[in-house]
Image: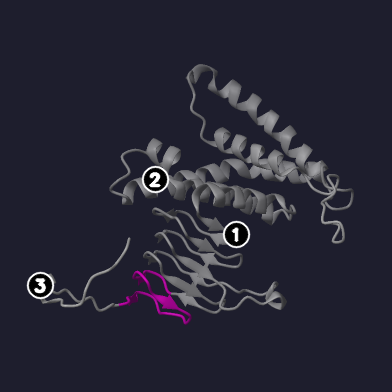
Amino acid sequence: MSLQQGYILSNSVPRKKQVIEFAQELVDHLFPVVENEKTFLQRYNRRLDILKNHFLEILFAFPEGTINDQEGISAAFFKSIETVKANLLEDARALQQFDPAAKSLEEVVLTYPGFQAVMAYRVAHVLYGLKVPLVPRIISEWAHSQTGIDIHPGATIGVPFMIDHGTGVVIGETSVIGKNVKVYQGVTIGALAVKKEEAEVKRHPTIEDNVIIYANSTILGGKTVIGHDSIIGGNCFITDSVPAHSLVYHQPIITVKNKKDFTEPLNWVI
């Protein structure tokens, strides 16, 4: 990017719109709505070939030397796609099993923002692992803009992973999350401090298996470990580790009075 002129040369990056279209096409490919089972496989394979061409166009959009072995990266990415899909099916089944509001697997896959965000994350995480620049962040921020859920593609997240409701969830780059973890809206799994010099160190917490984190709780710090099978209640602010099988909760004081006994004028404007 030219710092003086403030522009980005088109031959230095792939087009953002192109990456988002590829991500949407890939999501549609992973869980297509088909009209005819007999022609599904034929159309599935044809669509896969088109996706591979689109992905290579994105990789070749970077300047020479930025990415080496574009075809090898493409082959490795598409080799992982069936594993990504299998993991996503586990994510979806867990949501269907544990969310009383989920009436079907189709409802989870087609409508749940938590599932949509995890789907984009699992795709972007593969690209992050293959050291593809920029593209994983474009995909994760596209999902962020669609769902309100911000998962950095560098995070390591086990299977299954459930985000219920989801809006406002933030999961940082070096977070490590085990399997069968459930997170509600407004949860932050973040860094204790924002320091550029710590870019290469583990800045975000480790959440072990079978942990539930309720709404609006904040867990910070690269050395913070939430032990397995723990429950973190709503509105908790945690910067130290807690042992396995813990129940952590914040207990606010709520006072209920009869309105007749409350002599102060009520002038709240909503």
Disc nearer the start of the sequence (1/3): 1
- The residue that label 3 is drawn on is 260
Task: From the viewer's perspective, tell me whether residue 122 is left or right of residue 48.
Answer: left
Q: Position of residue 182 (x, y in %)?
A: 40, 59
Q: Position of residue 258 (x, y in %)?
A: 11, 72
Q: Residue at x 53, y 42 (%)?
A: 85
Residue type at the position of mark 1: His
Q: Nearer the viewer, mark 1 or mark 3?
A: 3
How crowded pointer 2 is (Cα within 10 Å; few <14, some 14-19, many 20+) is rated as some
How crowded pointer 3 is (Cα within 10 Å; few <14, some 14-19, many 20+) is rated as few
- The residue that label 1 is drawn on is 152
Q: Which residues are magenta?
A: 227-250
Which quadrant does the C terminus fall into?
Answer: bottom left
Residue type at the position of mark 3: Lys
> Helix, strand, or loop for circle 3?
helix
2 and 3 marks in contact (CB < 8 Å) = no
Q: Nearer the viewer, mark 2 or mark 3?
A: 3
1 and 3 marks in contact (CB < 8 Å) = no
> Helix, strand, or loop for circle 2?
helix
- Which of the numbered marks, if any, corresponds to residue 168? none
The single residue placed furthest to the bottom in the displayed view is 240
Main secondary-structure element of the magenta-colored stretch: loop
Location of residue 152 with respect to 102 vertically, above or below = below
Alpha-carbon distance for marks 2 and 3? 51 Å
Magenta highlight on residue 203:
no
- Which of the numbered marks, if any, corresponds to residue 93? 2
Location of residue 215 with respect to 124 vertically, above or below = below
Q: Position of residue 46 (x, y in %)?
A: 65, 24
Q: Residue at x 27, y 69 (%)?
A: 267
Q: Residue at x 68, y 45 (%)?
A: 77
